[in-house]
């Protein structure tokens, strides 16, 4: 009888230990699950710096600056932060010694009065200027990138994308001045037609040559 009671007590203790272990495992699992909640991780994005004011260097800086601003704006929106408080200014992106030299020798302004707007205007003047410079080869400028995307099913969207791509290439390479005014528009039209796919190029040239002529005659008729 005593032996039976001892066995029952041992069995009860064993069951109790299993229940206790199960609770501990469950608690541990819950704790572990809580600790594994994913946390947002952001890599540090450094603002591009200006250490060279040559046209080519500034064009590259403008490209990197645009990407940097887009990343910072997206992160601030997600974190509900003030973009201006996080974004590095154009002024602070300049090498301090270089900026001081530019203010003294080329811009004739006091360093304390220089704003981001002023600096961006000066940067754009440098990148857009073609005075005393050899004009770029238009074939080299557009041939690798300007493609008419035939995979876009909507005709108007396809044409718009082609024009937009041409404008992006023009801006990125700092040649906007070459495509301003009446002569600039003619120059851009030549570029757009030149890099169309073969059959479409032929058809477009035909339309421009003959339909443009018809339009001119119509304007001359009384």
Image: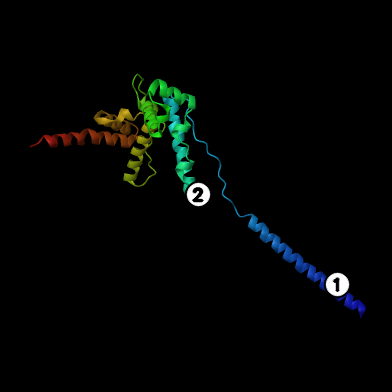
Q: In this view, does 6 lie above or below 44?
A: below
Disc number lying in front (1 or 2): 2
Q: Relative to residue 12, is residue 153 drawn left or right?
A: left
Left or right: where 74 falls relative to 147 = right
- Look at 79% across and 68% down and name the residue there: 17
Residue 158 sits above or below residue 20 on the image:
above
Closer to the camera, 192 or 61?
61
Element type at mark 1: helix
Kindly identify the residue that appears in the image at 49 percent across and 46 percent down. Answer: 75
- Please give the residue where the numbered disc 1 appears in the rendered image: 10
Quadrant of residue 104 in the image? Answer: top left
- In percent of width and height, residue 130 lies at 34, 23
Horizontal side of 215 relative to 15 (left or right) equals left
For label 2, count other residues whose C-alpha is less than 10 Å away and answer few (under 14), some (14-19) or many (20+): few
- The residue closer to the viewer here, 16 or 221, is 16
Q: Which of marks 1 and 2 is nearer the N terminus?
A: 1
Residue under circle 2?
A: 79
Q: Is residue 138 above or below residue 43?
A: above
Whether residue 173 is visible to the viewer of this picture, yes or no, is no
């Amino acid at each position: 009888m005593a032996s039976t009671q001892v066995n029952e007590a041992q069995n009860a203790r064993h069951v109790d230990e299993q229940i206790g272990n199960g609770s501990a495992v469950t608690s541990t699992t819950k704790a572990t699950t809580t600790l594994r909640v994913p946390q947002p991780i952001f890599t540090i994005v450094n603002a591009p710096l200006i250490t060279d004011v040559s046209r080519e260097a500034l064009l590259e800086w403008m490209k990197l600056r645009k990407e940097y601003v887009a990343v910072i704006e997206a992160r601030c929106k997600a974190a509900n932060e003030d973009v201006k408080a996080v974004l590095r200014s154009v002024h602070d992106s300049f090498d301090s010694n270089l900026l001081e030299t530019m203010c003294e020798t080329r811009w004739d302004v006091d360093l304390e009065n220089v704003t981001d707007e002023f600096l961006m205007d000066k940067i754009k003047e440098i990148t857009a200027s073609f005075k005393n410079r050899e004009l770029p080869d238009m074939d080299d400028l557009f041939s690798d990138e300007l493609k008419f995307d035939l995979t876009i099913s909507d005709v108007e969207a396809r044409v718009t994308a082609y024009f937009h791509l041409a404008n992006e290439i023009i801006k990125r390479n700092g040649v906007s001045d070459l495509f301003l005014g009446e002569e600039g528009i003619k120059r851009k039209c030549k570029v757009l037609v030149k890099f169309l796919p073969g059959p479409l190029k032929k058809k477009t040239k035909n339309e421009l040559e003959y339909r443009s002529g018809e339009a001119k005659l119509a304007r001359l008729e009384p």
